Amino acid sequence: MSLKNAKVLTISQSIHPFMDGPEEMAKVARQLPQGILEQGNEIRVFMPKFGCINERRHQLHEVIRLSGMNLIINDTDHALLIKVASVPSARMQVYFIDNEEYFKRKSDTHCTEGEFHADNDERALFFGRGVLETVRKLGWVPDIIHCHGWMTAFVPLYVKHQFADDPHFENAKLVYSVYDQPSEALDKNLVKKLTMEGFDKDLLKGLAKPTTDELQKFAMGLSDGVVKASAKLSKGLETAVKGYERSVLLSHGAEGDMVQAHADFYHGVLEEALV
C-alpha cells in the first residue's frame, strides 16, 4: 500500500537530536516523519520546548507570527510561544511549544533529582492545546494526527470534543503510540481542571484517579488507531492495547521497515474512514 499526498501531524514528547529520552520514542519521532515525507506526503512535527533543550546549539528561533496567543489552563492565562528548528541532514523542521511558567525549568518531565513535576498535567494540557491552536494558525489540515507518549494524551480529547466541528480537524484520524514509560501519579484535581475547560464530567470517568498510564488508556479510547511502540508495556497498558480493536504491534526492526509499517497502518486507518 502506498501512502501519498497525505498530511501527517506528528506530536511527540521527545524527538532526537533535541532530546534523547525516552530513547525509543525520540528515535521513532525523528525517523518516522522524515520517512513519511520522503514517500511523498506532507508533515508537521511538534514537541515541547523543555528548558533542558539547548536553544543555541540547535538553533531554535521564535516564530513571531505564530506566537502571542494566550491559553487558559486551570483558570489562568498562559502565553503561547512557538519556536522552530531544522533537523540537521533532513528536510524537516520541528516546531516547539514554549511558555515561561511551564517550560523554562531546566528539566523535562522530572526534576534533576528525579521527582515528577507536580504540574505535569497542566504542562501536557498546554502542550496539546498549543499544538492544535498553532496548526489552526498555520491553516494546515492534517489527515492523520499521530501522538507519541503520555504528554500528548490530551490531544485526542481536544480533537474529538473541543475541536470536533473545526474544519482543520473534523476529518482527521488519530493514531496513538504507546511506549514503555513509568506510570506516575497526576494531580488529583485533573478532572476539575478539564470540566473548567468545558468537558463533560461523564466523559472523564477514566481519569478519576489520574496516572500517566490511565491517561494513555483514556487517549487510546478516543483514537482511531493504536500502535504498540515498545516490545514490553506495563500489564495494564498491555491489556488495554490487546483490547483495542484497531491496534498493531510494529516490528522493532530496520528503520525502513518501521516507516513502511506505519505508512501501511496510516493507509488502513484512512481507508477504514472511507468505508
Image: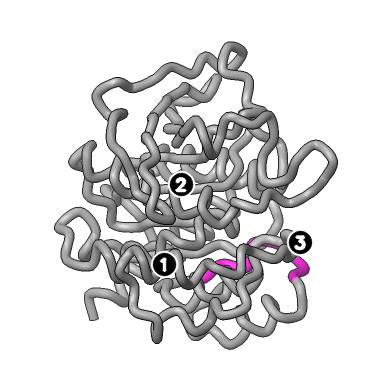
- Which residue is denoted by mark 1 in the rendering? 194
- N-terminal of the pair, mark 2 or mark 3, is 2
Instruction: Give the foreground label among 3 and 1.
Output: 1
Dominant secondary structure, magenta: loop
Q: Is residue 258 visible?
A: yes
Expressed as whole percent of the image width and height from the top left, the position of residue 86 reads 47, 22
Q: Secondary structure at mark 1?
A: helix
Helix, strand or loop at label 3? It is loop
Q: Is residue 92 above or below residue 245?
A: above
Res. 54 image quadrant: top right
Which is more N-terminal, label 1 or label 2? 2
Q: Amino acid at mark 1?
A: Leu
Residue 269 appears left or right of 225:
left
Residue at figure coordinates x 57%, y 38% from the top left = 30
Mark 2 highlights which residue? 127
Sequence order check: which comes first, mark 3 or mark 1?
A: 3
Q: Quadrant of residue 171?
A: bottom left
Which range of residues does the magenta coloring cover?
226-233
Residue 237 versus residue 194: which sits nearer the camera? 194
Asked if residue 93 lies in the magenta stretch, the reply is no
Q: Secondary structure at mark 2?
A: helix
Indicate the amino acid at tag 3: Pro
Whole-percent x, y for residue 267 in the image: 37, 64
Q: Residue at x 59, y 59 (%)?
A: 150
Q: Residue at x 27, y 75 (%)?
A: 273
Horizontal side of 239 relative to 99 (left or right) equals right
Residue 250 visible (yes or no) = no
Q: Is 182 situated left or right of 171 in this image?
A: right
Res. 92 image quadrant? top left
Q: What label sits on residue 182 in the rendered view? A: 3
Residues at discs 2 and 3 in contact (Cβ within 8 Å): no
Three-letter code for the amino acid on which mark 2 is drawn: Phe
